[in-house]
Amino acid sequence: MGIAREVHTEFPYLPASSLRGKIRSTIESQDELKEMAGTFFGQKIKDGQQPTEGEVWFADATLLFFPIASLSHHLVWITCPLWLDRWSRWIAGDSSEIQAFIKKCSAYFKQKDKDISAILSFPKEDLYLQTAFLKSANLVYENLQPVQDQLESLTQGSSLLSALFDKLIILPNEDCAALVEIGLQREVRVALEEDSKTVKGGSFRSEEAIPPEAVLFFPWGEKI
């Protein structure tokens, strides 16, 4: 699926329309569920009839954890107070513990007497990221149990994601945005002339993709 960019932050996201289309096509590919697609997503135009409105809605899928290569730790995930705050608004039940944790993280980055560049879920030591070096003196260790408790089911069954909370880094919003920009996957595509197999004029284009190890979340629900 193609990604889009938030106007105000430039963070990449998956549009709700793309999610809706992908989920619908997956359901329609299964014979036992095919008839349910029309109920969930609305009936398509058929035999001159008007399309109908579906019973479920989807919001955009936004980033929660983003993978970054590390020379010292192989692979780590980054997040930031903005992402955590967005996600916490959709948590069912009491989210006060999560909100308190997010405020604590934000307070670290606002301290004027200390230059805190990141909060780690693992013992602090010099951290070599793909394009950044973080000194251990500017790092803080924090127990991420409030976040982990809410997402425990996410990491079960995945050997890769099971290591997420042992390799998680919380960065200031601005630093997180910079590393995401560098960490996106980019491919240059060209179109060729059918006869000569040479590049068509002006046909170069660049495509961006979110790494498969990234974790996104999207709210959805039933229309009332």
Image (cartoon, grey):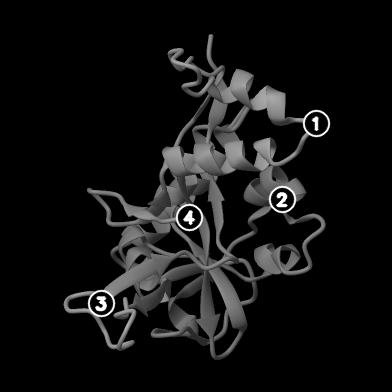
Q: Amino acid at mark 3?
A: Phe
* Nearer-N-terminus badge (1/4): 4
Residue 79 image offset from top left, x and y in percent? 48, 60
Q: Label 2 to label 4, Cα distance in Å?
A: 21 Å
The residue where tag 2 is placed is: 154
* Nearer-N-terminus badge (2/1): 1
43 in relation to 81, above or below: above
Q: Amino acid at mark 1?
A: Glu
The residue where tag 4 is placed is: 1
The residue where tag 3 is placed is: 204
Residue 97 image offset from top left, x and y in percent? 59, 38
The residue where tag 1 is placed is: 32
Determine whether the residue tagged by mark 1 lies in a helix, strand or loop. loop
The residue at the far top in this view is 224
**Res. 73 visible in picture:** yes
Is 155 displayed left or right of 198 in the figure?
A: right
Is 185 displayed left or right of 42 in the figure?
A: left
Dot 4 alpha-carbon crowd within 10 angstroms: few under 14, some 14 to 19, many 20 or more: few
Q: Amino acid at mark 2?
A: Leu
Q: Label 1 to label 3, Cα distance in Å?
A: 42 Å
Residue 179 image offset from top left, x and y in percent? 38, 72
Determine whether the residue tagged by mark 2 lies in a helix, strand or loop. helix
Q: Amino acid at mark 4?
A: Met
Q: Select label 3 or label 2 by which is in front.
A: 3
Q: Check contact, mark 2 vs mark 4: CB within 8 A.
A: no
Q: Label 3 to label 4, Cα distance in Å?
A: 20 Å
* Nearer-N-terminus badge (3/2): 2
